[in-house]
Amino acid sequence: MSPGEFQQRLDAISEKDGVPYGRAHMLFDSEEEYGHAALQYKGYLALTDAFKCLYLETVEILNTQCRPKITTPISEHYAIFVPRIAHSFQSLRAAERTALRGYPLHAYTVLRNTFDNVVLTSAAVQKITDFYSIEGVEPGKAPDLASIKKIRKKAEFEARAKMTGDQSGLSATTVAELAKWDALFDFEVHGARLSLAWAQDWMKGEAPLPVLPTFVEQQFSMFVNRYCEIGWMVLRLMPLIQPQHAPFPTSWQDKWEILDDSFEIMVPLSQISAGNRSGQPLLNL
């Protein structure tokens, strides 16, 4: 079969009302409509775009201004830390793109891994654990898959206990609330139970099967809530990207402080909005 014949056969089975791949266009249109509906979140969109701008400026400053000034070897831990922050930024962006096209709970699952990575990175920076342990390696020893998994798992459990668990010094009420938010992550990551809950009307025979993206404020609010929380966590680690002997300009610090203040304002708002049932636009600042 030639490439042309391969495509022609697919073209022939995918036409609807004279439109090639017409049903797929229904999907594309729904995704576009979802993105327009999300525009009501003006405060969130301004904050996330400003966050992107500062991170990209940070990398630009690092590459063009700081690196030429570095004349002594950089800590190996720094070389591990910076790519972890870059990966967290890219993961946040990937999750946001997914959410804005109509799949906020799928995006929510991406945030689960991002949250874990940022918590562990912060724990290593604070010397609650170390970068080798969260990578699952022991210096001077040849790694193997079994030992990597064991070391990483042990490091994660110990770090989470000290960061957000019963060894954190937080109140029992706060630890319990954090555990509930963590459980919501697991409900979706393991078994898509939050997504399945939105299909309950179909399960009861009371509605069509939902497949095309439809804007549901509560779903998007859940994503926004965790995005803002994790974005703020990443922002708090960004000053450590500055090389010791090549600090960023004061203008960078001023922008960072504005973003830090903005996240502090937005995170409580998004937590409130996650429980909103009024049907009114949320975070419409």
Image (tube, rainbow, N blue to C red):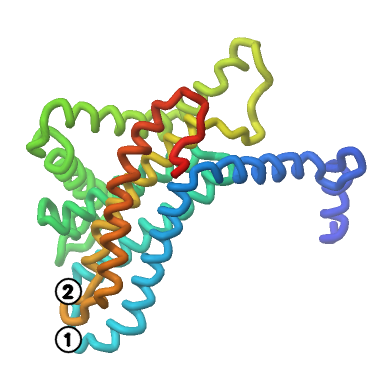
The reply to whether residue 233 is visible in this rendering is yes
Sort mark 1 into few (<14), some (14-19) or many (20+) by Cα contacts within 10 Å.
few
Q: Marks 2 and 1: CB-CB under 8 Å?
A: no
Q: Which of the two residues, 28 or 149, is positioned nearer the viewer here? A: 28
Measured in 3D between alpha carbons, the distance from the residue under mark 2 to the one under mark 1, in whole angstroms, is 10 Å
Residue pointed to by mark 1: 72
Q: Position of residue 172 (x, y in %)?
A: 12, 27
Instruction: Please indicate whether residue 79 sits to the left or right of residue 204 in the image.
Output: left
Q: Give the total of numbered labels.
A: 2
The residue sitting at the right extreme is 18
SS category of the residue bearing label 2: loop
Instruction: Please indicate whether residue 190 sits to the left or right of residue 201 in the image.
Output: left
Residue pointed to by mark 2: 75
Q: Residue at x 38, y 39 (%)?
A: 225
Query: Vertical placement of 107 versus 133: above or below?
Result: above
Sort mark 2 into few (<14), some (14-19) or many (20+) by Cα contacts within 10 Å.
few
The reply to whether residue 95 is visible in this rendering is no
Kind of residue at badge 2 = Ser
Q: Quadrant of the N terminus?
A: bottom right
Q: Residue at x 47, y 30 (%)?
A: 218
Kind of residue at badge 1 = Thr
Q: Residue at x 34, y 78 (%)?
A: 61
Q: Residue at x 37, y 60 (%)?
A: 87
Q: Quadrant of the C terminus?
A: top left
Q: Position of residue 7 (x, y in %)?
A: 83, 54
Instruction: Please indicate whether residue 231 sits to the left or right of residue 206 in the image.
Output: left
Query: Vertical placement of 244 versus 179: above or below?
Result: below
